[in-house]
């Protein structure tokens, strides 16, 4: 598809995002402890961990929805900091998909998808709409373009949210538990879209509880435990003969 | 009162019905202001012979309401933004403004702007109509601020996060995402305030503005016939508020994309 053909083709080994010694506190709780990692272009990373392990927080520091207290995060050469101009530039390159979809309820599906390109990239309306229709077609929702979000199912709303992020042609897509708010029968339609994106070489960082997705689609599993990176390995290894006691306990819980 | 919206053909879209209602209400209002002296002139004394006088007073009342209504909403938005601002000084200024205006009677505010303000700042010596507009605008603004603030606070945090994470600037986030949703939530209390404003504009009579209540009072003083005169005055107010609620109802329905309103 032409839309995704326009994706940046960085070589798969160069780090797109670097995270250095990042710490984050919520009051007395120390939720991220000296986290060091990097994310390469074209790579699909699944971030796993028990609830409260800091996985969503880590994801949200990458586009400054949470401020980190210390350390350094660099995304595509832009340091994540408080400078508003720099932050807006960064966020235009980093797409985010939320657990609760967060579609704009007062706008139609098409307006949801075209808003950011028109406002941020100053794309003319007709062009933005043509591109949006192409993306909606990709996620199988072209027929719903003129509906408002309330008229769609959860799975459909989440697919619109993915199309909305893609409309900015981001360098990386962050997913914050994208299927956790969905009924089981709708999980698949969203995961299918995500698999499609992964197959096209989209850089994705996915906080998820979908072990099947992590196993099949992710090239790498990052396991957080009490704010620390406890494992960083390929899924075969992670889900294989696991020696780490805490990870075995976690996987045992999940599989019950 | 039922919605005028229901009289439009069933095939019309929600937007079209809403626009049609607003246009129709506008036409009714203009006709009312322009031609009301004609039916009033047919009434027996003391109404018929004072028909022009009533019409003139009604026009002034509507002018006061429109000016103070529009500027009151603008002031209300600014004060609501001030009160929800991250900057302490803005919160402080907005808080004091709302505290003072809501804590003092409107009549005192009207008198203050007309009599006391020129003594304080000689450059602010305003005419009676302008003084009334100023006092009413700031009064409505304070009440509107709280209605709009409630709306702003009711917009889920995730909406702002989604907009910001798409790269929208704080300005576009506000204009395209936060404000339209907040405004929809604030609309019913805002309408309350504007209906109250229409009636409160009668306090302008204390500084000699010849609006509807003042007209009624003057005719009554001259004719000693309170019953027909006050009935006429009240009926005109009721007509005006009825037109106004039709407009607000149409606006509310325009925003009702989910079809929540019956």
Image (cartoon, rainbow, N blue to C red):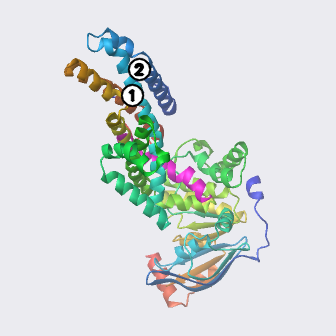
Secondary element type, mark 1: helix
Secondary element type, mark 2: helix
For the residues labelled 2 and 1, say whether their Cβ atoms are less than 8 Å apart: yes
Q: Which residues are magenta?
A: B168-192
Taking depth in this image into account, of B184 and A2 the one nearest to the observer is B184
Q: Chain of mark 2?
A: B
Q: Is residue B126 above or below residue B147?
A: above
Q: Quadrant of residue A214?
A: bottom right
Query: Which residue is pictured at 37% across the width and 25% down the height?
Result: B57
Residue A54 point in image, percent of width and height:
51, 78
Residue at which label 1 appears: B243
Residue at which label 2 appears: B32
Residue A252 point in image, percent of width and height:
46, 81
Using residue B169 as the reference point, say whether residue B31 is left or right of it. Answer: left
N-term-proximal mark, 2 vs 1:
2
Look at the image and tell me in which quarter the C terminus of chain B lies: top left
């Amino acid at each position: 598809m032409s839309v995704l053909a326009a994706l940046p083709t960085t070589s798969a080994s160069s780090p797109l995002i670097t995270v250095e010694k990042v710490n984050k506190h919520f009051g007395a709780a120390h939720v991220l402890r000296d986290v060091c990692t990097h994310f390469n272009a074209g790579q699909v990373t699944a971030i796993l961990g028990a609830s409260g392990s800091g996985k969503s927080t880590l994801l949200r520091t990458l586009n400054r929805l949470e401020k980190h207290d210390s350390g350094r995060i660099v995304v595509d050469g832009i340091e994540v900091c408080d400078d508003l101009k720099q932050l807006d530039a960064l966020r235009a390159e980093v797409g985010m998909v939320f657990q609760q979809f967060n579609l704009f309820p007062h706008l139609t599906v098409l307006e949801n998808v075209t808003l950011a390109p028109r406002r941020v990239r100053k794309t003319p309306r007709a062009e933005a709409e043509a591109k949006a229709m192409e993306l909606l077609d990709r996620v199988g929702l072209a027929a719903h373009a003129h509906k408002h979000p309330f008229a769609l199912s959860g799975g459909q709303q989440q697919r619109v949210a993915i199309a909305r992020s893609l409309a900015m042609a981001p360098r990386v897509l962050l997913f914050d538990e994208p299927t956790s708010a969905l009924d089981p029968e709708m999980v698949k339609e969203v995961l299918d879209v995500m698999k499609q994106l992964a197959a096209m070489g989209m850089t994705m960082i996915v906080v998820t509880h979908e072990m099947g997705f992590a196993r099949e689609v992710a090239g790498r599993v990052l396991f957080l435990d009490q704010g620390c990176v406890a494992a960083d390995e390929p899924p075969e290894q992670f889900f294989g003969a696991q020696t780490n006691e805490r990870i075995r306990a976690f996987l045992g819980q999940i599989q019950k | 009162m039922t919605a005028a919206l229901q009289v439009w053909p069933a095939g019309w879209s929600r937007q079209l019905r809403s626009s049609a209602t607003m246009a129709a209400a506008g036409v009714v209002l203009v006709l009312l202001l322009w031609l009301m002296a004609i039916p009033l002139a047919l009434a027996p004394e003391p109404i018929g012979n004072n028909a022009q006088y009533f019409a003139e007073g009604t026009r002034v009342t509507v002018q006061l309401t429109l000016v103070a209504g529009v500027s009151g909403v603008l002031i209300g938005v600014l004060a609501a933004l001030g009160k929800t601002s991250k900057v302490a000084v803005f919160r402080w200024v907005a808080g004091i403004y709302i505290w003072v205006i809501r804590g003092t009677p409107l009549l005192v505010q009207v008198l203050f702007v007309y009599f006391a303000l020129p003594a304080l700042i000689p450059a602010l010596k305003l005419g009676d109509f302008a003084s009334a507009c100023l006092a009413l605008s700031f009064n409505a603004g304070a009440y509107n601020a709280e209605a709009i603030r409630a709306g702003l606070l009711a917009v889920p945090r995730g909406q702002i996060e989604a907009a910001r994470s798409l790269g929208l600037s704080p300005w576009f986030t506000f204009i395209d995402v936060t404000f339209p949703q907040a405004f929809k939530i604030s609309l019913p209390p805002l309408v309350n305030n504007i209906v109250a404003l229409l009636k409160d504009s009668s306090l302008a009579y204390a500084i000699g503005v010849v609006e509807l209540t003042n007209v009624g009072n003057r005719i009554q003083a001259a004719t000693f016939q309170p019953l027909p005169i006050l009935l006429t005055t009240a009926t005109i107010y009721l007509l005006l508020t009825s037109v106004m609620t039709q407009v607000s109802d149409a606006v509310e329905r325009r925003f009702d994309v989910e079809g929540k309103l019956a």
